[in-house]
Image: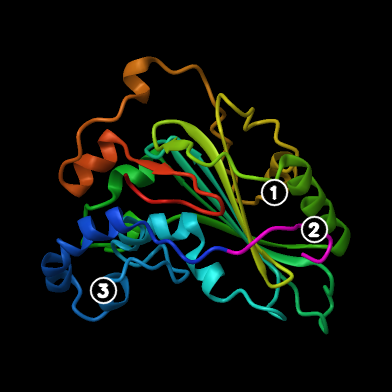
Amino acid sequence: MTNLRLTGKEFPTAAGPGACRARRARRGLLRALSAGGLLLLAACTYRGDLETPFAQKLTWFSLLNGDDIRSACHEGAPDRLRLVYNGRYQEQLRVYDLVASDPAGPNAGGAELLARVQDADSYNRLGSIDLGSPLSAWQWREARASLSEEEFRRLQRTLEQAGLGEPTPAGTELLSTRFYWIAIACAGGRVWFQAWQHPASDVTRLPFVSLLLAADGTGVPFNAPRPLGADEVALQDPGPLKERERGGFRMVVTENGLGGLP
């Protein structure tokens, strides 16, 4: 993202230790279900796959913190960007990954976009298995698109206008029961992070939102924020993984990332 005029410092990877501890306790069960594929997931580090069984449950906090982007971010690395919308965790999740196009290719200066959306129906199938289609419970709706150089620059500018590159709201608790956006970028060999949560921020009118939705070919309508009652926002006491997700979870914004579960 050569157009972003970002200044600041890079922080080490933080994968959400609280989330990892909870998931490591379930390794025995997961190995029994998939002895080979789950060795990768046991470390709770997101590596680009949300469709592998249980990958979302194990690596969601790592994805939000952009651990994969952080580990690959260095001088000369291609610019990358991830924007995640939490439209209440059980109702809608939207993940937008962008990587700078090949500078020697036909879309030089632009970016390749992968949009993924999971709605309430998809979430409710997590943890269930249809023998006729065993991976259907982890399916996301996906769409790919190429952004031209001008479109990519415009997205970069709107992100800067929204606050990417400025101090984060450190100490803010992001609640899975609320509506929020997270942005993480590798630009010019440095890592940048920002978060916006409703109602402190109008997450529908952030400058970059309309551009993302215009490029989103998944066909899933945006789950816009709405007034929530206290009982809808409140988090229940942690329990088993499925129950804890239904009860909600929280993450804490740090200077340049997420501090995981308190």
- Residue depicted at 42% across the width and 67% down the height: 46
Q: Nearer the viewer, residue 28 or 258?
A: 258
Q: Nearer the viewer, residue 220 or 203?
A: 203
Whether pointer 2 and pointer 1 mark residues with C-beta atoms closer than 8 Å, the reply is yes
Image spot of residue 13 (x, y percent): 47, 66
Q: In the image, is residue 216 above or below residue 48?
A: above
Instruction: Please give the label number shown on residue 4.
Output: 2
Give the magenta range: 1-10
Q: In the image, is residue 145 above or below residue 209?
A: below
The residue pinned by badge 1 equals 164
> Quadrant of residue 74 in the image?
bottom right
> Is any atom of residue 113 visible in this view?
yes
Number of residues whose C-alpha sits closer than 10 Å to that of mark 3, classed few (under 14), some (14–19) or many (20 or more): many
Which amino acid type corresponds to the residue marked 1 in the rendered image? Leu
For marks 2 and 3, the one nearer the N-term is: 2
Image spot of residue 157 (x, y percent): 82, 50
Residue lying at the far right in this picture: please name it.
150
In this rendering, would 104 be left or right of 159?
A: right
- Residue depicted at 75% across the width and 73% down the height: 101
For marks 2 and 1, the one nearer the N-term is: 2
- For the residues marked 2 and 3, what is the alpha-carbon distance in whole angstroms? 37 Å
Image spot of residue 169 (x, y percent): 57, 39
Which amino acid type corresponds to the residue marked 2 in the rendered image? Leu
Whether pointer 2 and pointer 3 mark residues with C-beta atoms closer than 8 Å, the reply is no
